[in-house]
Amino acid sequence: MKQLILFFAVLGVLASCGTANQNAATVQDLHPDQVFTVTEDDIALETRQINEALRGEWTYKGPSVDVSGRNVLSGLGKPIAKGKLKSKLKKAFKKIGLYKARPQFTFNVDGTCTISMLGVRLKGTYNYNPSTEKITFKWHGVPLSANLKRDGKNKLHLTFDTDKLLSLFKLLSSVSDNSTLKALAFLTDHYDDVMVGFELKK
């Protein structure tokens, strides 16, 4: 009987040693250097998943305005300020021909993009952060940042600081003639707290 008890005791010790070895192997398998390392493949996969939501052709539907500051348009309330500026922006966009050949933005999952506007087709790259709703374009090495807000699955609001929107127009074309600049000149007057740009529809 004592021999039988001793036999089972030895088996218990061996089993516990085996479990300990398995746990040790598991802990070793979960080494922080292996678990928490972010590889280039991980980043590329996440970027493609983010870009997938933007993939496709987005066409200009109308102007978009986002008011962030308090002292805009002589102290008018935000809804009134946005309405007045949007109406003014719509007229200016018509003058420079945006309604004749509607601007189009094409986003690809590989981070490349194309913009067609004012008779020019420009290829570049983009980087979008959905948590901050910020997008940075690069055309010919020139970075240009903007806000990009999704409105459902088929609508985007792409807005720029006023000076950056003017930079985009100048980059795109020969938007240097007096009539065009005059149509957009109001953007440089007292609109520091305003983002202006395009409402895009898929």
Image (cartoon, rainbow, N blue to C red):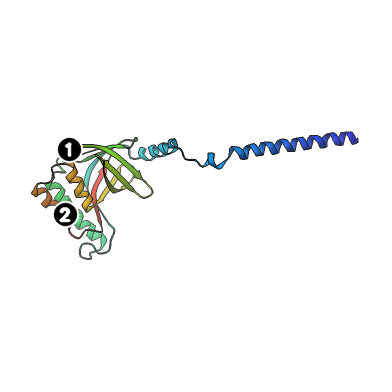
| 113 w.r.t. 197: above or below | above
Of the pair 29 and 45, the residue shown nearer to us: 29
Secondary element under disc 2, as helix, strand or loop, is helix
Where does residue 98 sit, x and y in percent of width and height? 16, 44
Foreground mark, 2 or 1, reads 1
Residue located at (22% from left, 44% from top): 61
Q: Amino acid at mark 2?
A: Lys
**Which residue reaches farthest bottom?**
75
Residue located at (18% from left, 45% from top): 169
Whether residue 64 is visible here, answered yes or no, is no
Secondary element under disc 1, as helix, strand or loop, is strand
- Read off the residue under disc 1: 120
Whichever of callouts 2 and 1 sits on the residue coming sooner in the sequence is 2
Q: Seen in the image, is 69 located left or right of residue 37? A: left
Residue located at (29% from left, 58% from top): 68
**Which residue reaches farthest right?**
1
**Which residue reaches farthest left?**
178
Disc 2 crowd, CA 10 A, few/some/many (<14, 14-19, 20+) = some
How many tags in the picture?
2
Question: Which quarter shows the C terminus?
Answer: top left
Task: Kindly check if marks 2 and 1 are in contact, taking CB atoms under 8 A apart as contact.
Answer: no
Where does residue 127 sit, x and y in percent of width and height? 33, 42
| 28 w.r.t. 186: above or below | above
Where does residue 143 sit, x and y in percent of width and height? 27, 45
Where does residue 190 sit, x and y in percent of width and height? 20, 60
- Distance (Cα) linking label 2 and label 1: 24 Å
- Read off the residue under disc 2: 88
Q: Seen in the image, is 131 located left or right of residue 3? A: left
Question: Which quarter shows the N terminus?
Answer: top right
Residue located at (34% from left, 49% from top): 133
